[in-house]
Amino acid sequence: MLYAQRERFEKYSVKIGLIFSKLGLTPNQWTILSLMPAIISFYYLINNQYLLSGTFLLLAGFLDVVDGAVARVTRKVSKLGAYLDTIVDRYVEGLIIIGLFLVTLNTPQLIFFPMSIWVLLYLFGSFLTTYAKAAAKEKDIVSKKELKGGILERAERLSLLTIGIFLAHWQPTYLNYVIILLAIFTNISALQRIILTCKTAK
């Protein structure tokens, strides 16, 4: 969804790239650097300090924007950079999901499955959404452009997760509902990509 609106954010991306390129770090160094606030976010999350956890997760998301912006401004866009960015993205999201397993999440009333199952479904849907794209590319079904689309891409997932963690500072139950939404819509997104791939292959 946000990917489809990327042209609207292009001018801001250029400004970000121009500012941060002056610091002398390469795009790949910015990519690796985004792991640090994610690790700190994980630490605060498992210690139930949701406000700090959300803040550092937000910072990790911002640094994920910085690496691409710097790469485009400095004309250092590369296949290796894109590969590292994808891998680090999985580490960041996976790390926070592991944190959710370690947090005590009481199952809300009228919810049939324990929260651990919902977290697991979110993990499955998140990684399957990514793998659906990678598999389409690997099997040469989509060759020119990467498979995009789905109701929740990574940017939306990370944004919704960050909001849920922030809301948990005031009411932990809100995080539970956000996790349930993520569990449902990430799996819908994966199915949307699978269906799109099947249509493309015909």
Image (spheres, helix red, strand yellow):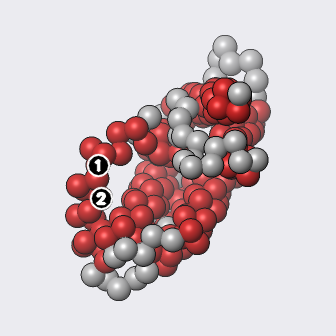
Quarter of the image where the C terminus is located: top right
On the picture, is 29 further left or further right than 186? left
Give coordinates of residue 28: x percent, y percent.
Answer: 50, 75
Classify 178 as above or below 98.
above
On the picture, is 198 further left or further right than 66? right
For disc 1, the marked residue is: 9
Residue 103 in view? no
Give coordinates of residue 32: x percent, y percent.
Answer: 54, 73
Rendering quarter of residue 74? bottom left
Mark 1 element type? helix
In depth, the one of 8 and 169 nearer the eye is 8
- Residue at x 40%, y 60% (from the top left corner): 65
Classify 56 as above or below 166.
below
Classify 72 as above or below 197.
below
Q: Distance between the residues labelled 2 and 1?
A: 6 Å
Residue 13 badge: 2
- Residue at x 31%, y 83% (from the top left corner): 23
Q: Which amino acid, mark 2?
A: Ser
Q: Do the residues labelled 2 and 1 touch (CB within 8 Å)?
A: yes
Mark 2 element type? helix
On the picture, is 72 further left or further right than 142? left
Q: Which amino acid, mark 1?
A: Phe
